[in-house]
Amino acid sequence: MEKCVKLTGLEDHAITLATVNLLTKNYRRHADVDADWGGFAGKAALQNLLAQDSAVGIRYYYGIDVDGVCRLVLVGVDENRNDLLDATAPLLALRDPHNRYGQVSAAEADHTVSLAAAAQLTRRYRRSAGERAVIGGYFGKAALEKLLAQPECIGVRYYFGREDDGKPVIVLLGVDSAGRDLLDGVLLDLSMLCPPFCADINLLNSAERLPFPGEAEIAYSGKLAA
């Protein structure tokens, strides 16, 4: 389905460290004491998503696992904002401990998850979220490749954040093999949120497939239940 707003992969997601601090502080202020602050995705797995022929970036979906913990499901995205689900399986980001320094992460970390399991995760999140809630977002290929190309970077750490109005966001930054955040390097937010910049209806963003692709755009305006 052709969409008015196409993705290029060249979108600018750069933010300052001050903005990172503000967004993550907003999240922690309202989160439960034992809530996760974020997670990790290895370099090799992310590069595999970006290497798909038509991929212009990566979309993340919020999910909730069987323990009630918020997780991220990651998939490649094409220029028409559609998720690339046929050739490459989704990724499940790893949970990140609060005491993260000294926790050695791996560039080749296993993020394997089936599409069916990923769909269960995202469905749990949607059922817990309010009407028209943000269910995910998109980061362009160029910005992600720049982040991953940093010396010592073995992957991406994400932090949960919130705008001043309460809207959830994701902050991305590089991490080294000792678990240290690369705070002097590339810092990303400003993702294109879903809604409104969503894929056509699929197993990761709707409990059921809609009968006609044209209904996908209407679904995210709140006129149909996802």
Image: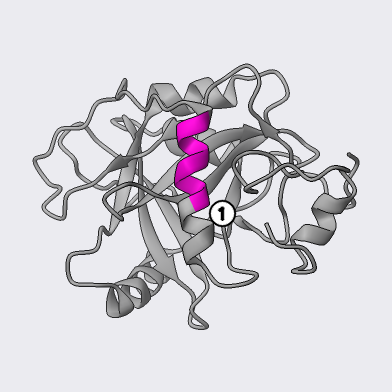
First to last magenta residue range: 116-123
Can you identify the residue that label 1 sits on?
136
Q: Residue at x 38, y 48 (%)?
A: 173
User: Looking at the image, is 21 positioned above or below residue 213?
Assistant: below
Q: Is residue 215 above or below residue 43?
A: below
Front residue of this view, candidates 42 and 111: 111
The residue carrying pointer 1 sits among few (fewer than 14), some (14 to 19) or many (20 or more) residues within 10 Å by Cα, namely many
Residue 163, position as x, y percentages in the image: 49, 75
Let me know if residue 150 appears in the view.
Answer: yes
Q: Is the stretch drawn in magenta largely helix, strand or loop?
A: helix
Examine the image and state in which quarter residue 202 appears. top right
At a point 70% along the width and 62% down the height, the residue shown is: 225
Residue 33 magenta-highlighted = no
SS for callout 1: strand
Residue 118 lies in magenta, yes or no? Answer: yes
Where residue 186 sits: x, y (%)? 43, 47
Where residue 72 appears, x then y in whole percent? 43, 46
Q: Is residue 5 above or below residue 115?
A: below
Classify the position of the C terminus by image quarter. bottom right
* Residue 99 left/right relative to 14: left
Residue 149 falls left or right of residue 135: left
Q: How is the image coloured?
A: one colour
The amino acid at mark 1 is Gly
The answer to which quarter of the image holds residue 81 is: top right
